[in-house]
Amino acid sequence: MSVHRPVKRLTAPDILARKGGAPIVSLTCYHAHTAALADPYVDFLLVGDSLGMVMHGYETTLPVPLELMIMHGRAVVRGSKRALVIVDMPFGSYEESPSVAFRNAARVMKETGCGAVKLEGGRRMAETIRFLTERGIPVMAHIGLTPQSINVLGGFKTQGRTRDAWAAIEEDARQVADAGAFGIVLEAMAEPLAAQITKAIPIPTIGIGASAQCDGQVLVMEDMLGLTPRVPKFVKKFGRVGDAIEAAISEYAEAVSNRSFPGPEHTYEVKD
């Protein structure tokens, strides 16, 4: 008689323990079916607020509501078995105070079943990160280019391009690590700065447009698959799924226009 052993899902401590070890593989994910496809290959799936731009047509991530993150978070948890699922805290759901952040983060974890949340900001969010982690909510931090702050940053700009900006960004990394974050995303950051931060802090760094020396990498899945028309220059398209979808739709439209679909093989016969 065989014994079914359920797949053990990775946790935040598992990711933390990978510091300096085998590179951490991750992707953004917003659907159950893509979660199922990615699950065997990644260590964590990030339900990023980038879904507002990728799936819902927003110009930025700022309009994304908490309810939308919860809906997509549920789908990704249902579709995956092994990967840690991390859900982004959207703009306006955590900045007001640590207690507001806890209330909303607890709701995200309860209603999605995810294993951690991610929030943007360095030293200004250290108090909130400490408040959440002390109350049982694992937090991944995010510094460098923080898309929720583009109105302050003046757009989607690479951070740390001049060495006089490095000290502030390094201090951001140090403070969120000291506050208890189990990992930190370094986005759109000058390569030598990202490499230096990776060596200096005791938690894993996850690069997106940063350094190959980071402890892991994350990409927006749709960018990586070639599903979005405009992607950052650091993204390598590992697939051309958008082209394949367009070709298939074109072929279908032509078949319908020529009245060649459905053909006999796709129809039901009337039985006497």
Image: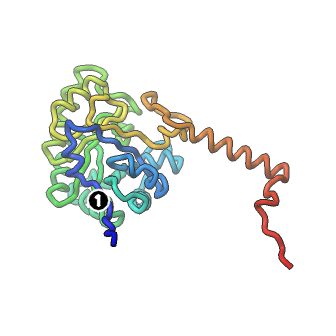
Give the x, y percent position of residue 52: 47, 49
Write the residue at 41% across / 33% down: 156
Write the residue at 43% across / 46% down: 50
Give the x, y percent position of residue 256: 80, 52
Residue closest to the eye, 225 or 128:
225
Write the residue at 18% across / 55% down: 133
Residue closest to the eye, 96 or 77:
77
Q: Choose top left, top right, bottom left or bottom right for residue 116.
A: bottom left
Whether residue 144 is situated above or below residue 191 in the rendered picture: below
Specify the farthest residue to the front: 1
Whether residue 76 is situated above or below residue 171 in the rendered picture: below
Q: In this view, does 11 lie to the left or right of 151?
A: left
Give the x, y percent position of residue 49: 40, 49
Whether residue 259 is situated above or below residue 174 in the rendered picture: below
Give the x, y percent position of residue 181: 20, 47
| Mark 1, residue position | 8
Residue 83 visible to an observer of this rendering: yes
Residue closest to the eye, 42 or 209:
42
Write the residue at 79% across / 55% down: 261
Callout 1: SS: loop
Q: What residue type is labelled 1?
A: Lys
Specify the farthest residue to the right: 272
Residue 91 visible to an observer of this rendering: no
Near mark 1 (Cα within 10 A), the count class, few <14, some 14-19 or many ≥20, is few
Q: In this view, does 220 lie to the left or right of 205?
A: right
User: Which quadrant does the N terminus fall into?
Assistant: bottom left
User: Which quadrant does the C terminus fall into?
Assistant: bottom right
